Image: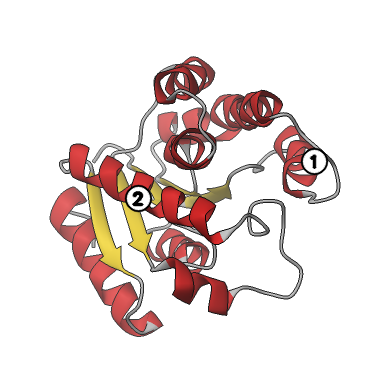
Amino acid sequence: MKAKFIAFEGGDASGKTTQAERVAAKINAVFTREPGGTPVGESLRSILLNPISPLALRTEALLMAASRAQLVHELISPTLTKGQHVVTDRYISSSLAYQGYASGLPIDEVLYLSVFATKELTPDLTILIDLPVEESIKRRGKSPDRFEEENIDFHKRVRDGYLEMAQINSDEWVIIDGTKSQENVAKDVDQAIHDRLQLP
């Protein structure tokens, strides 16, 4: 079987990281995250998530793309070529949701950056853990990062963007109700992976 590439997406505190790590362990996949996943990417992550350092919006988009380019080159593509699955916590759609839909950069320009950065590598399946913004705010920790600090309208635009992308790309996306218990979310995620990718 060809190695599969699965991306988990969702707003802040949606539970996607927990599910992504669990799935990676279950299917013997390499787990990674964005921004980050490589020494270069982790350095960029510290800049991108720091709420103190001001960043121009286009700088933010470029740094996200740079982290993604290094991740694909150094980890994702080589791992898939070796025949091992990859599960990532965030990928291209995060840039479209946050820098595009929520922040206002032209969607096609943000997409072009990521297509260039990844050499057109796209996931076999994108799993959106959907959660109402009001619920995600309740779940957040006490030390919010740059994106978590944004206002509620920003996060509603992020969610709306994700839902629109999932609707447009329904063959490659699945929406999971993140308001359910962690156990039931896991069951829904596993069922979706089995149905879409024929993985155990």
**Whether residue 169 can be seen here:** no
* Mark 1 crowdedness (10 Å alpha carbons): few <14, some 14-19, many ≥20: some
Give the residue number, with chain letter if any, for mark 2.
160
Left/right placement of residue 7 relative to residue 53 reads: left
Residue at 54% over, 35% down: 99
- Kindly identify which numbered label has been placed on residue 47: 1
Depth order, front residue of 64/19: 64
In the image, residue 35 sits, relative to residue 51, either above or below, namely above
Name the secondary structure under disc 2: helix
* Type of amino acid at the residue the image marks with label 2: Asp
Up/down of 118 relative to 200, above or below: above
Q: Give the SS element for disc 1.
A: helix
Q: Return the x and y of residue 101 as percentages of the image width and height.
A: 44, 38
> Which quadrant of the view contains residue 181?
bottom left
- The residue depicted at 49 percent of the width and 42 percent of the height is 102
The colouring scheme, among rainbow, by chain, secondary structure or one colour, is secondary structure
Point out residue 174 in the picture as x, y percentages from the top left corner: 23, 54
The local crowd at label 2, few if under 14, some if 14 to 19, many if 20 or more residues have their Cα within 10 Å, is: some
The front one of 161 and 80 is 161
**Where residue 90 sits: x, y (%)?**
49, 47
